[in-house]
Amino acid sequence: MTPDELVALRMLDQVVFPPETFDKRFANHLKKLRDEGHPAIEESFVPPFWSLLIRYQRQIRHPQRLKYLRMAGRLITPLVRRAKLRQRSQEWRDARNRNQEAKGIHQAGMERVRTQPVPTGQKYAPGTRVRIDDHLDSTMAHFPSGKNATVRYTYAHAFGGGDIVSYCLDIDGHGEVAWYYEGQLTPISP
């Protein structure tokens, strides 16, 4: 163990740990290593060791307490940053993979719309001009209403299944928006 680690471990001798906690077992293990004369702390033990010093800093009474707390902060901060960066990059990769997967599903659906006939029972065929009701329910308040649109496809037409009442529309001045219900649409003449 380095001289700094030995001083920090002596500081932890004063700490009263909660009973039967990881912190207590870990500190006792480190003290045992020190008493047996082990030359160094394992690499994986270094961050949790210095974290103990920060976690129980209020119980520590030592003339160089602040020096060692600053040292612990410097030793732990890069590790925390690296862990957060690793987590963020993994989240970014997961989001990118979900996005690619969603694009693949959408492209397969569009191919299905081009190649498959309209499902039986579908009220409005692709290309039909419709008007969206002026008043949509509260769950769809953010959707454009009172506009003219062209039917693109139903959910069943693009992605399979039996949902022939949910429509994707190409709304004049807004672009493609999904999913409107059949009861919210009224056919208009072309």
Image (cartoon, helix red, strand yellow):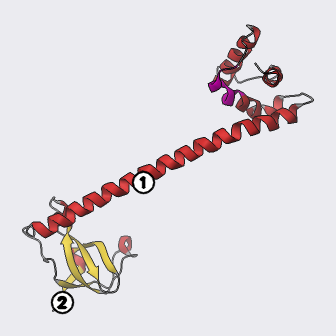
| Picture coordinates of residue 125, whole percent (x, y) | 13, 77
Q: Is residue 51 left or right of residue 66?
A: left
The quarter of the image holding the C terminus is bottom left
Q: Is residue 125 above or below residue 4?
A: below
Label 2 sits on a secondary structure element that is loop
Looking at this view, is 97 or 145 the one in front? 97
Label 1 sits on a secondary structure element that is helix
Q: Is residue 111 left or right of residue 45?
A: left
Q: Is residue 78 above or below residue 114?
A: above
Q: Which residue is at a point 27% across and 79% down the rendered structure image?
A: 170
Q: Which residue is at a point 19% across and 61% down the rendered structure image?
A: 159
Look at the magenta stretch and give its main secondary structure. Answer: helix
| Picture coordinates of residue 118, whole percent (x, y) | 10, 70
Number of the label disc, if any, that sits on residue 188 = 2
Quarter residue 148 falls in: bottom left
Q: Is residue 14 left or right of residue 141?
A: right
Q: Is residue 92 above or below residue 21?
A: below
The quarter of the image holding the N terminus is top right
Kindly give the residue lying farthest to the right in the view shown. Answer: 63
Q: Which residue is mark 1?
A: 95
Residue numbers of the magenta segment:
41-49
Task: Say what amino acid the circle numbered 2 marks.
Answer: Ile
**Sequence-wise first label, 2 or 1:** 1
Q: Which residue is at a point 21% across and 75% down the rendered structure image?
A: 152
